[in-house]
Each structure stands twice: as C-alpha cells, then as structure tokens.
Amino acid sequence: MLRVEDIGVRFGGVHALKGVSLTCPAGQVTGLIGPNGAGKTTLFNIVTGIQRPDAGSVHLDDRDITRDSTEQRARAGLARTFQRLEVFGSLTVRENVQLAAELHRGLRRRGRSPVELADDLLARVGLTAVADHQAGVLPTGSARLLELARALAISPTTLLLDEPGSGLDEAESHQLGDLLRSLAAEGTAVLLVEHDVQLVMRICAHIYVLDFGQLLCEGSPAEVQADVGVQQAYLGAESVAS
Amino acid sequence: MDTFLALTVTGLVTGCLYALTASGLVVTYTTSGIFNFAHGAIGMLAAFSYWELTASQGMPGLPALLLTVLVISPLVGAVIERLLVRRLGTASLEVTLTVTVGLLLLLIGIANTIWDPATPHRVQAFFLGDEVTVAGVVLTAHQLVIVATATAVAISLWAFLHWSRTGVALRAVVDDRELAALTGASPTRVGQLGWALGAGLAGLAGVLLASQVSLDATTMTLLVVNGYAAAVLGRLTNLPLTFVGGLLLGLCQAWAVGYLTLDFISQIQPVIPMLFLFVALVLSPQARLRVAQTAPLRAPSVPGARRTLLATGSFLVVAALAAVAMPLSRMGDATHGMAVALILLSLVPLVGYGGMVSLSQLTFAGIGAVALAKVGGGPEGLLAAIAVPAAVGLLVALPTMRLRGLHLALATLAFGYAMDDAFFSNATVMTDSLGLPVPRPLGLDDPRGYFFLVCGAFAVCAFGVLALRRSTLGRRLVALGDSPAGCSTLGMRVRRTKLGVFAMSAGMAGLGGALLGGQQGAVGSADFGLLLSLTLLLLAVVWGVRTVSGVLIAALLLEAAPLLQDHISGVGSVVPLLVGLGAIGLGKHQNGIVGSVVAATRRRRAVPNLPQPRTEPPIREEVLTSAQS
Ligand SMILES: Nc1ncnc2c1ncn2[C@@H]1O[C@H](COP(=O)(O)OP(=O)(O)OP(=O)(O)O)[C@@H](O)[C@H]1O
Ligand SMILES: [Mg+2]
C-alpha cells in the first residue's frame, strides 16, 4: 500500500505540486488523472525517489520512505514504468526482464530461474514473439508493455504506471485493462496515470484528479465523472479537443 | 604585501584568459548542447593564423587580430557546426565526445602539417616594452590589453544576450530548445551563431595567449583546456559564474605559485587548474536522473559461450604461429600492438558496455607499468600491475561515481592531465630522464616467448570480457549505459556496479601498460600522455568499442600507422590526421566500423516482421497544444 501526504514541490518559483495527499490501497487499481502538466509524472518521480519533495512524506506499507534512495524503495516493493520510455535499448526484450528478475533475486539461488520468470512475464503481457529482439527497436506500445513486464519481475507490492496505454490500439488497451485488474486481484496496489479516460473509468476503483499541481477531487468513477470542476478542467477540454 | 599584490595582478590577468576561453565554451555548449573538446584547438589555430599574418606576412598587429578573431575563427566555428555538429543530433555522449575530440586531434594534425613544429614560432606581445606601474605593481601593456579585452567582452556579451533580438533568441534556446523552436527562433541558426561566437572567443583567447608561451600546437591546445574548470564552475551554462570561475582559477594558481614553495607542492603546481576542475566537478550539482533517449542503435550481437571459446582458441593458434614464424625484426612492434590492444580492451566493459567514457585509460596503464617496475618482474610484480591501478581507479571513481556522462568524462580528463604533470613527469617516480626501467615480467627475455605471453594475456582478458557480457553483471552494465533511471527503479545498486567495473577496467589497463613497459624496457612520461590517451579512445570508438574484434583491429592499425607514415612524406603526423578524420566519420556510423559491418551483414539475414522503430512524440508539444486549447 502506498500513501503520500501533503507533498509539495517547486520548480523555480512555480508550484508543480502543492499539498497532494493520496492513498493507493492493495488489491485495487487507483487512477490518477489530470491535464498535461498537472504534475502526475512529477508525483511519480517523488514517490520513487528520483526527485526530492520540498514538503510532505511518502509511506510504503506504513513505513516512511521519504528519505530512502530509489534503490531502497525498489527493494521495499515499489516498481514503476516511465512515460518517456526507459527500456534498456541495447539488451534484448528477454534480457530486460531477466535482468530485473536477477536484481530482485540477488544472490539467492532458490526459486524459479530469472529466464523462466522472464518468459512467463513476457507471455503475460503478450511479447513472447519479440523476446529475442533488441528492445530499442520496439514500437512505443510494445516498449510500454515491456516496461510493465520488467517492473513485474521485481515482484512489487505497489506498481506505478505512467500512461501504459498510449501507443496501444483499442484491443490491446482492453487487454491491458484486464491484466491490470488481475494484478490488483492478486493483491498488488496499482496506481495508474492514463489519458485514456475509458480505460481509467473501466478498471479503477478510486480516482484522483490533479490539476495545476493540486488535487481537484477524488472518488469513484461515477462521482468523478459527475464533478463539474473536473469536466471543466479535464474531461471538457478532452472532449473539445477530440 | 607587495608580493601579494603582484601575485594577485598576475592571477587576475591569467584569470581573464581563462574566463575568455571558458565563456566561449559555455556559449557553444548552451546553444548546441555539445561540449566542444576542440575548443582549445580552435584557439590554437587562431594563434597560428595570427602568427602567419603578422610574423610571416608582415601585417600589423591590430588588423591581424581583428581578422583572426572576427573573421577567421568564427568562420571555422560556423563551418564545424555546419559540417559536423548539425549531423550529430541526439547522438550518445560517447559519439559526440569522440567527434569533438577527433576534431581536436585533426586540428592539431593540420597545424603541425602547415607550421613545422621543429621551427620555433614567436608572436610579439602587444605594445612590446611598454609598462605601467599601478600601486607599485608593474604591468606590461599586453597584460593591460588582456584585462581590458576580457572586461569589454564580458560587458558586450552581457549586453548582446540581454538587449539584442538575436541575443534574446540565443538565450531562449539555451533555456529550452524545443520551446524556443515553437516560438520561432531557429535552433539551427542559433546553434551556428553560437559556434561562430564561441570560436571567436576561443580565437581571441588564443591570440592573447600566443605571445605569453612558445607557440606549439599541443601545448596551446592543452593550455586552453585549463579553462574547462571555469566553465564547469559556471555549470556550463552560466556566463557570469563562468567569468568569476576563471578569475578565481587564475588567482588560485598565482597564489599557489607564489606561496607554496614546499618542494612537493611546487611540483604539483601546474596541476592546480586540473585539481580545480576535479573539485568543481565533484561538488557540482547533478541534474536529476533523466536520460535523454538516444536514437536506438543496433547493438552488436553477443557471441555465445561456444563461439567465444572457438574464437579465443583460434586466436591463440594464430598467435602461436605468428610467434614462431614472424621475423624477429617485427616482433617488437607486434608485441607492442598486442599490449595496446589489451589497454583498449579495458575500454570495452567501461565505455562499450557501460557507456562511461574515461579519457584517462593510459594513465592507469602507466601506473601499471610503474608498479611493475617498482615491485619487480616476478608474479607479484604482475599482480601489483593489476592491483595498484585498480585501487587507484577505485579512489578516483569514489568521488566521481555520482557524476554522469560528460561530467565523469571531464573528471577523468582532469585526473589524466594532472597525473601527466605531477606523476609521470616527476623525477622521484621516473628516476632518470631516460625513463624508468621496466623488467620483462616472469623473466621472459625471449622476444617470441614474450610475444606469446602478451597474446595469451589478451586472450584470457578478452574471454573474460565476453563472459562478463553474458553474465548478469554484463547485463547490468549495458542497462546502466542505456538508462540509469530504469536501473535504480529496479533496485540496482548503481554505485557499486559502476565502481566495480571502473576498478576492473583500470586493472586491465594496468596489466596492458605493464606488458607494454616490459616490451619497451623502459617507460617515460611521453608514453602515457593525455593526447595519446585520447587518440586510443578515439581509435577504439571508431572501430567499435562495443566489440572485442573492434579494439583488436584498432590496436593493430595504430601499430601499422608508422609504416604508413614512411610512405607519406610532407604530412607532419599521420596518426592524428587519420584518427581525427575517422572520428568525424563516426557521426554517420555511430556503432563504429566493425559494428556497422556486423549490422550490415545481419540486415541481410533479415528478421521477419521486425517492428517499426519507435518514435516518441515530443512532450513539450503536448503541453503547448493543451495550453492553447
Ligand atoms: N525538471 C523540471 N524543471 C522544471 N519544470 C518541470 C520539471 N519537470 C516538470 N516540470 C513542470 O512541472 C509541471 C508538471 O509536469 P509533469 O510532467 O509532472 O506533468 P504531467 O501531469 O505528467 O503531464 P503529462 O500529462 O503531459 O505527462 C509541468 O508544468 C512541467 O513543465
Ligand atoms: Mg506525465
């Protein structure tokens, strides 16, 4: 379970985040939406320790990890994917996942071998066909799925996904939704940032809406959809644009 | 008190020169995003052009200065931008670095070809003989000119950047290239302008410096490298801070010269700018974890265990045949080449796999040779030749592991440069002027036996490097080179991995250096110089630093270069020219020659339905369009 409290961060004089608190319980998919530049990725960076907050704290399974390094957080069970891809482009697709499994396993020799685990996870996200290809030449959608498989290889208790659905077609995106739901059903806390509103409404149990670095509202999909402020700030703009 | 004043004044004058070069560097870096290692070489070229115009063609000083600084140098800068820099786009650091370092060597090669280094070139100071006395301190008119010019440049740069339209566009690009593009400023045009301006500043510093030192292509180029420290203090982007950094550096150096008279300290005195650079780097704030995704390269395939074994075996057979059949007169060169190959091999895990560019690999090789010389030729000597450089590598790496990319490369540059001056030129280390005698390891005095020993060492290390690549540590390294952020979010202990490979690579280079020393019988300061280090790195990257075969070819080619030299008369030094040209060609074939050949053969055996290369939408555009809607 992930809990962030009262997070604030500034870039220069501008508040990128201000007083943001949210909870992401185990066993469900929690949504985090908001227009471009709302601060979603920045929040992910703070939660994973890539960036330090100016205020507030981050708790993982009721332990304060605000001062921990990125590596320590990963070892504590936190995994993420990136909006701007961070796949290991010179390794093969299988090696990407295998490496993550090896990092998780460390020096222990028990349990499934990293290669087996990698092949299972690739099958799960549907990348078996390209397992031996160099990851750097994958199209965006597949690369995002690879990042998901890689994140799963460290057996996270909390999983942060930054726009995993962009670059996928409708059918693939539907499959992704099913996969995320089944992950949640297995007990993982999933925090999903996604611009595909349909996907978010379909699979999230609870949704937070971020705008200009502040929480605009939160609630069930129905409640969020009914909120006037949200419609103006986000859903409205989206429907105008499309 | 008088000494203090005098030292301060000298320091400020030197500082002005540093500030001038450094500000040129900052201007090119901020406008094009590429750190121009050839900056010093452009200054050097300007100094020689100035000599040509004045001493050789008889032009008076001022018009020659104006012509050099306002026309020739900016033109050189603009041409470089047009032909080289623009093509680089989003190339990886290892490529942009190689291309600009290649340019540096090329310019040195050109200068040495046109202006024979054997004949001295002297440039007269401005207003020679005129002196002014200020508060009891005697200043030459030339020094006054330097201070006045630097002040004028500082003020006009500031005014230009803040008041003129072009200057404002330049600053906008510095702040954010993509955003500036959307508002109408053309980053390409601004980049070209930045390079012209930067080269002009390099030229100005070069001409002003020319009369203060003897005009020598290498010395001049490296002198300007001192200015890097000031640029780093200005975080490579901040001009006022850069100027302050330059002055500070000049002052530190002058005071150190004046007050630190202890024997040991006076020996390390020339190293001060490099210490300054090192400290500035270690203390510099690092941008948060963020890798710019470089264009996807087709990485060379990794040979499997059986192929590796087969290749190593065949190599040893060939080596054995060569050891028996080769004429004795060629034995020395061949052994030398294999030792160099071992040094280059040490770059494969570090640069090729891990993407950490080290500019001082020869320094570690030199430490290995010295360790062997001091401990003796037995097995314990060979062990020391590996362990001592590895330990030094660890020491250098510890404070710098936080650094990434360019900063790490600069830190190794500072280390290599400093060791050049303080260690390899030090009488206490190198016992006598003819160099330090190095014994043949294991008492192998027979040249054929020794050749085979070196080949064997290479084979073992090459096998080890390939095995490493197939291991989890190898995957870690490659992943680290591709995406540090990805690594740490998966729980990799990044620092530990980097330290480990740095120490290992230094140890391997040390072994290579020791074997090289054993072949030569003695080593001197010229064997491990910084320029040679750069040349080797370039050769490796040009031929393919990601592959063992690439570095092997590179080393053998370097050995063959003197043969080539005999056939081309009139060219000062063929190696820098060739290496420079090769490195520049790298802009097109970024995987190195071997990598490109491998990729070409693999393309013929096309993989069925390979997905399209991914294209990332520029994120800034999203932000902007949503803001407009
Ligand atoms: N390193 C940085 N320096 C300065 N400003 C930054 C930095 N990173 C992000 N910002 C700014 O902070 C704000 C939030 O950015 P962030 O990337 O978190 O938004 P987002 O919600 O993820 O948007 P998107 O939907 O486009 O991904 C933006 O205005 C962005 O320009
Ligand atoms: Mg984002």
Image (cartoon, rainbow, N blue to C red):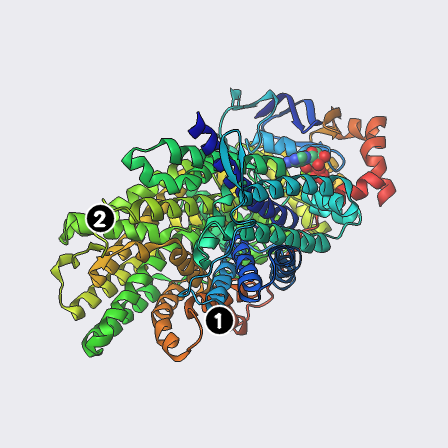
Does dot 2 land on a helix, a strand or a loop? helix
Confirm if mark 1 falls within 8 A of ligand 1: no
How many numbered dots are placed on residues in this image?
2
> Alpha-carbon distance for marks 2 and 1?
39 Å
Residue A125 image point, x, y percent: 58, 48
Residues behind callouts 2 and 1 on a single chain: yes
Q: Residue B154's quadrant in the figure?
A: top right
- Rendered view: B469 above or below B336: above
Does dot 1 land on a helix, a strand or a loop? helix
Question: Residue B597: which numbered mark, if any?
Answer: 1
**Residue type, numbered disc 1:** Val
Q: Give the image quadrant in which the ligand numbered 1 is located.
A: top right
Residue B392 image point, x, y percent: 31, 42
- Rendered view: B248 above or below B498: above
**Residue type, numbered disc 2:** Ala
Residue A241 image point, x, y percent: 85, 43
- Circle 2: is it few (<14), some (14-19), or many (20+) Cα within 10 Å? many
Residue at the spot 27% in from the left edge and 65% down from the top edge: B336
- Rendered view: A2 above or below B93: above
Question: Residue B371: which numbered mark, if any?
Answer: 2
Confirm if mark 2 falls within 8 A of ligand 1: no
Residue at the spot 36% in from the left edge and 59% down from the top edge: B344
